[in-house]
Amino acid sequence: MFDWFKKKLTPEEPKIQAPEVLGLRLGGAVELDDLRLKLIEPDLIIEGAARTQLIQAVGVVNLDEQTRLLRYYTDDDGFIQVLQHGRSDADVSEVKLYYFYHTKPIDTQAQWNDALNHHIVQDSKELEGHHFDKVWENERPVAMTEKTYLSDGTSSETDQFVMIYERELGNDQFESMMIAGEEKFVKDRAEWCVVTSTGFPLTPTDFTVIG
């Protein structure tokens, strides 16, 4: 009985909260500017972007001690990615809206090695007849680890091996393509896939946090 009483008095460990920035938060919502999308969407790979999106998960990638990527995954098969050089809104240098284009499952270690060595990083990529040039100078995929927080309070980690490509739309606007090899261990067994996403920059006037 004493042990039971002692456990009742032991404070619970506080749950780690997903990071918030620019008002974006897990469980929140964002509204995209309709006029902005009508003007730019015809030039993009994506189509039919939802104007109102709910944030269902948050990913964090620490690039170094100060710099990190925050990814706010929405119910519209996309994510808002924020590049932050600190921990305040003033430290944000870039915001992009990405949409998942294709996910290719990888079945064997040999296929995974081939993707890392030959397919993720190339001088350029073609997608739906559009030419994208490699942005980063790296000859190998850039390795990063994302910790993802879900709305049910759980979290998971995924190792990612990434390259960014870009094409000019005109009027000094660009569309990005992210190729990411993802490796995740489930019950000590590796699961692999290569994810292709396309995205475009958001300015502070392009979206409004509504929840």
Image: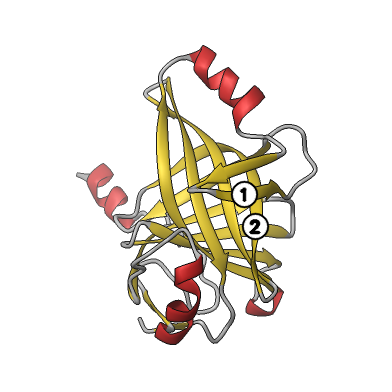
Q: Which residue is mark 1?
A: 131
Give the residue furthest to the front: 129
The residue type indicated by label 2 comes to Arg
Which residue does the image show at 74% across and 54% down from the upper left?
A: 65
Which residue does the image show at 52% across and 65% down from the upper left?
A: 19
Q: Is residue 85 above or below residue 37?
A: above
Instruction: Give percent across and percent down for residue 130.
Output: 56, 51
Which quadrant would residue 70 be assigned to in this image? bottom right
Q: Can you see residue 18?
A: no
Instruction: Identify the disc placed on residue 30.
Output: none
Which residue does the image show at 72% across and 38% down from the upper left?
A: 123
Which residue does the image show at 35% across and 56% down from the upper left?
A: 77
- Image check: 123 left or right of 145? right
Q: Which residue is mark 2?
A: 167
Instruction: Give percent across and percent down for residue 190.
Output: 45, 22
- Give the Cα separation between the discs numbered 2 and 1: 6 Å
Give the residue furthest to the right: 137
Confirm or deny contact between disc 2 and disc 1 (CB under 8 A).
yes
**Circle 1 SS class:** strand
